[in-house]
Amino acid sequence: MKKLVGYITASFPNNNFTVDLGLSMAEAGVDILELGIPFSDPVADGPVIEKANLISLQNGFKMKDLFEVSAKIAPNIETLWMGYMNSFYHQGMENIVQKAQNLGVQGAIIPDLPYEEAQSYQELFLKHHQALISFVAPTDTKERISTVVKDAQKFIYLVAYTGITGSGQSEDLTHIIENVREYSSTPIYIGFGVDEKTAKAKAQGVDGVIVGSAFVKHLLDESMNFNQKIAKISSLAKEIKEKINE
């Protein structure tokens, strides 16, 4: 069965809501939850997630909020932290990786951490039984792919197109997927532009999908109350999970 990774912005609009939403998404079929760490300059994210980031920061988000929601979510669903290197670095890498292990979080997705720099942290992550997720982009050469994926853990994050999340572009990734398969047996999950309309097509040839903006846009919908948002996002998660496995 193909997997569904769901991204939500941590503590947006508050900690209790994030916990309730995360647990509801798990029941709806989400296999891995990405807790996004609000950051002022989320360079890989589109306007939807960027807006949620900025509102969360304006509301006073602190890293202790991430730790609080993770403590309640991680025992119930496989959880990863998705954030930018600045957020991790300022906590101290040893400290935050140890904290993740203690809370039951299983790894990190850091899109602005280049592969070469990530290598200096691999031993630290492995020591604490954490996965540092590897990225493959459509612009990567076969030689580059062979290097990036050789030690990939948990899953390989295949970027669906060159750009930012949520923009809905598409590229033919057949050869990229074939190249990854040649050098690694680690599952491939595709992200960027995946929603209920595109999920079935994008899931072809890969092992799972990563959905972010399609969920977060409902977090930003001020016409719904908290319970309605949880119901809407959970229903959407169930729909996407069913579509990728048709």
Image (tube, rainbow, N blue to C red):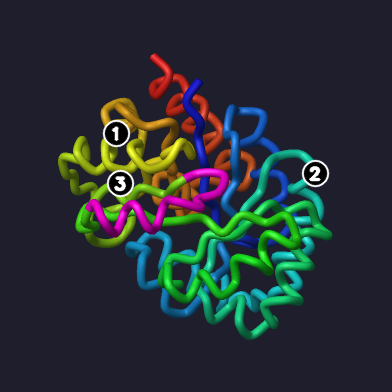
| Disc number placed over residue 95 in the picture, else none | none
Of mark 3 and mark 2, the one earlier in the sequence is: 2
Looking at the image, do the residues carrying marks 3 and 1 touch, with CB atoms under 8 Å apart? yes
- Image-based side of 184 in relation to 28, left or right: left
| Residue 53 or residue 78, whichever sits in front | 78
Q: Name the kind of residue labelled 1 in the image.
A: Lys
Looking at the image, do the residues carrying marks 3 and 2 touch, with CB atoms under 8 Å apart? no
| Residue 139 or residue 53, whichever sits in front | 139
Residue topped by disc 2: 75
Residue topped by disc 3: 193
Could you say where residue 37 lies in the image, as x and y percent from the top left? 58, 67
Residue topped by disc 1: 202
Residue 149 is one of the magenta-drawn residues: yes
Instruction: Using the numbered discs, state the Cα–Cα distance from disc 1 to disc 2 in whole angstroms.
Output: 30 Å
| Residue 209 or residue 6, whichever sits in front | 209
Visible in this render: residue 13?
no
Q: Residue furthest right?
A: 102
Residue 31 is one of the magenta-drawn residues: no
Q: Residue at x 50, y 70 (%)?
A: 118
